[in-house]
Image: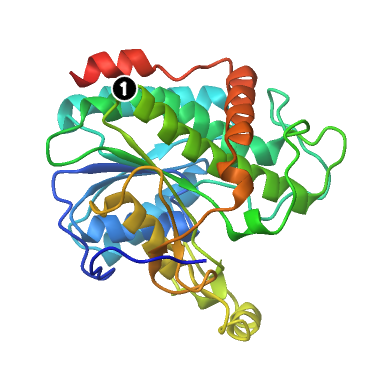
Amino acid sequence: MSTTEPGEWDPSHLPPQDGRTYLVTGANAGVGYFASEHLARAGAHVIMSGRHPNRLAAAHDALEARVPGASVETLLLDVANPGSVRAAAASVRGGLFERTRLDGVIFNAGIVHTPRVRTETRDGRELVFSTNALGHFVLGAELLVSLAKSATSRWTPRMVWLGSISTRMGAFDPVDMQLERSYSGWKAYVQSKVAAQALGFEADARLRDARLPVQSVVAHPGYSIGGRTPRVTGVNEPGTVKRIRDLLQSPIAQGKDAGARTIVRALVDPSISSGEYWGPKYLTRGPAVRQRPSATSVDPEVRRRVWEACEELSGIEWPFQKAVRAAR
């Protein structure tokens, strides 16, 4: 599954990120929290976003306690709610007067433990697809101009889409992306992650066509579980039973802090090119390496259909030409 890994990379000593600003969705727990922590340790200003105010505040406090002097702020954002996405993006754009740049975004927020029965959002979209894929499509559109404005001769702003090893394990039906005909929790998760990966690869193609100085990379955290993750008050507090159960999975699993390292590398490693796919070396665990994605998520027809479905469902098109003008 893996291919060669360009250059040496020490996940505990990231390249200095001072002066850069990154937005992480779903940052109050799991991979999103630890990605935020890794970035803050490297000197970046991190915008931690999430939909639960109390959980987000707890994660913010935990990060500041674990990374003294961290530059971090919080942003309420529910990726399954288009209104919330637009409001959050407007807040980010409005804050750029002080920071002057947005250097990257990690599209991390998502549903892993899916509903047993099909559930819809307030605007009538299937919940898992809306959370794991559609909401980030909308956020990408809303932040594209800000990302393009931040390009320099030394850094190209980057978006990272979170994929999953599950994309190799299930079928994808581009005709029934919202699972109106047949629903199962597993199918909903796989479909949403195929869609997220397809959006990431299609974004790369469209960004290249528009000659925009913004990159799109897809990465997955392998099999990262809470019981293999360091205890962080208010963020990750697995009980004894879960610790024991997850310990039995040690040969194939890793902690969420380790999974986050792959995502962070996909965001900040200058040797990585737009359109690449990254994941743990041993598929479910291990150091980050470049990999081959599932055939479905790179299929041009699947990518096109997913992109156009997201445009139709959201009523939004990415402002490529406006971003090109902003980048000049």
In front of the other: 89 or 201? 201
Q: Residue at x 55, y 43 (%)?
A: 298
Q: Residue at x 69, y 49 (%)?
A: 189
Q: Position of residue 76 (x, y in %)?
A: 45, 36
Judge from the rendering whether residue 32 lies leftward or rightward of residue 305; answer left or right: left
Judged from the image, the secondary structure of the residue bearing numbered disc 1 is helix
- When asked about the image quadrant of residue 223, the answer is bottom right
Judge from the rendering whether residue 18 lies leftward or rightward of residue 87; answer left or right: left
Which residue is under mark 1?
145
Judge from the rendering whether residue 196 lies leftward or rightward of residue 22; answer left or right: right
Judge from the rendering whether residue 177 lies leftward or rightward of residue 216; answer left or right: right
- Quadrant placement of the C terminus: top left
- When asked about the image quadrant of residue 144, the answer is top left
Q: Is residue 89 visible to the viewer in this orientation of the structure? A: no
Amino acid type, residue under disc 1 in the picture: Val
Q: Position of residue 12 (x, y in %)?
A: 26, 71
Q: Is residue 307 visible to the viewer in this orientation of the structure? A: yes
| Residue lying at the far right of the rendered structure | 181
- When asked about the image quadrant of residue 207, the answer is top left
Q: Residue at x 26, y 55 (%)?
A: 269
Q: Position of residue 240 (x, y in %)?
A: 61, 82
Q: Mark 1: few, some, or many residues within 10 Å (few <14, many ≥20)?
A: many
Give the vertical position of 20 relative to 291 (above or below). above
Q: Identify the coloring.
A: rainbow
